[in-house]
């Protein structure tokens, strides 16, 4: 099976062409020189390069896309791209939790035991999920403040391997209880599109709807709720 997969839930723009475990093409675009994500400007070109490496879209069997949690704008870009390509090409499209893909990367890096993915959730929060050594979810993806996550970590019998942009951002806070976090530049903190492809290919059943994993309402919705409250005269 040939899968073209991509993810823009994080600051990166990741794309890959994957065939039965073999990576045919993989790319990872970081921020632009202006410090902005290149989701809108770079994704389609990277996806087309991945498809070309597979011999063109005629040789692709399915599309895989990261569903987050992550940036609201990034998720919309990736999911809209996947939906458009699937409709235009008549290909099935399957969504994958971005945290699942990062957890697989922790295992690929050779880390043993439980794996904790901590992704920057902005607003002083993180998106986190805990996995067993066999990639089974032990904690479902959720939003935490660093102190809340530390409290949950204190309940564990053993310290998990930790990675993700949130663990980099809150390194000082999370290291207080002995958590070891790889160097900031370690690629284990970033999503790899080959893991998006592999997880999608291994999934069972129908692909289903590409529903973003938001975990909390968008800022615009919160602002609407705030503005709907009556104010004192």
Image (tube, grey):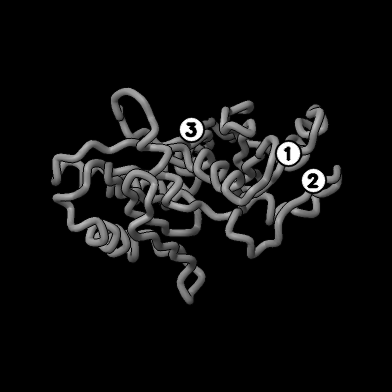
Secondary element type, mark 3: helix
Per the image, the residue denoted by label 1 is 160
Contact? badges 2 and 3 (CB < 8 Å): no
Give the mark, 2 or 1, whose residue is nearer the N terminus.
1
Give the mark, 2 or 3, whose residue is nearer the N terminus.
2
Secondary element type, mark 2: loop
Query: Residue 216 shows which numbered tag?
Result: none
Badge 3 crowding class, 10 Å Cα cut-off, few under 14, some 14 to 19, many 20 or more, is: few
Select label 1 or label 3 by which is in front.
1
Per the image, the residue denoted by label 3 is 228
Per the image, the residue denoted by label 2 is 179
**Residue at the top extreme, as displayed:** 205
The part of the image, by quadrant, that contains residue 104 is top right
Find residue 224 and report its horizontal and vertical position in percent: 46, 37
Q: Nearer the viewer, residue 103 or 111?
A: 111
Q: Quadrant location of the C terminus?
A: top right
CA gap between label 2 and label 1 equals 8 Å
């Amino acid at each position: 099976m040939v899968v073209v997969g991509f993810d823009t839930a994080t600051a990166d723009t990741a794309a890959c062409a994957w065939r039965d475990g073999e990576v045919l093409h993989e790319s990872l675009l970081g921020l632009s020189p202006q410090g902005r994500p290149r989701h809108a400007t770079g994704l389609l070109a990277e996806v087309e390069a991945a498809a070309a490496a597979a011999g063109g879209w005629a040789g692709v069997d399915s599309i895989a896309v990261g569903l987050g949690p992550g940036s609201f704008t990034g998720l919309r870009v990736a999911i809209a791209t996947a939906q458009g390509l699937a409709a235009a090409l008549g290909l099935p499209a399957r969504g994958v939790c971005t945290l699942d893909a990062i957890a697989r990367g922790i295992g690929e890096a050779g880390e043993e035991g439980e794996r904790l993915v901590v992704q920057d959730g902005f607003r002083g929060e993180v998106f986190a999920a805990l996995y067993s050594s066999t990639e089974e979810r032990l904690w479902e993806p959720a939003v935490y403040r660093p102190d809340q996550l530390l409290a949950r970590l204190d309940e564990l019998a053993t310290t998990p391997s930790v990675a993700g942009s949130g663990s980099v951002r809150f390194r000082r806070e999370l290291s207080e209880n002995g958590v070891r976090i790889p160097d900031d530049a370690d690629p284990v903190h970033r999503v790899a599109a080959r893991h998006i492809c592999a997880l999608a290919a291994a999934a069972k059943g129908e692909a289903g709807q590409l529903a973003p994993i938001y975990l909390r309402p968008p800022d615009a919705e919160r602002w609407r709720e705030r503005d709907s409250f009556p104010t004192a005269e």
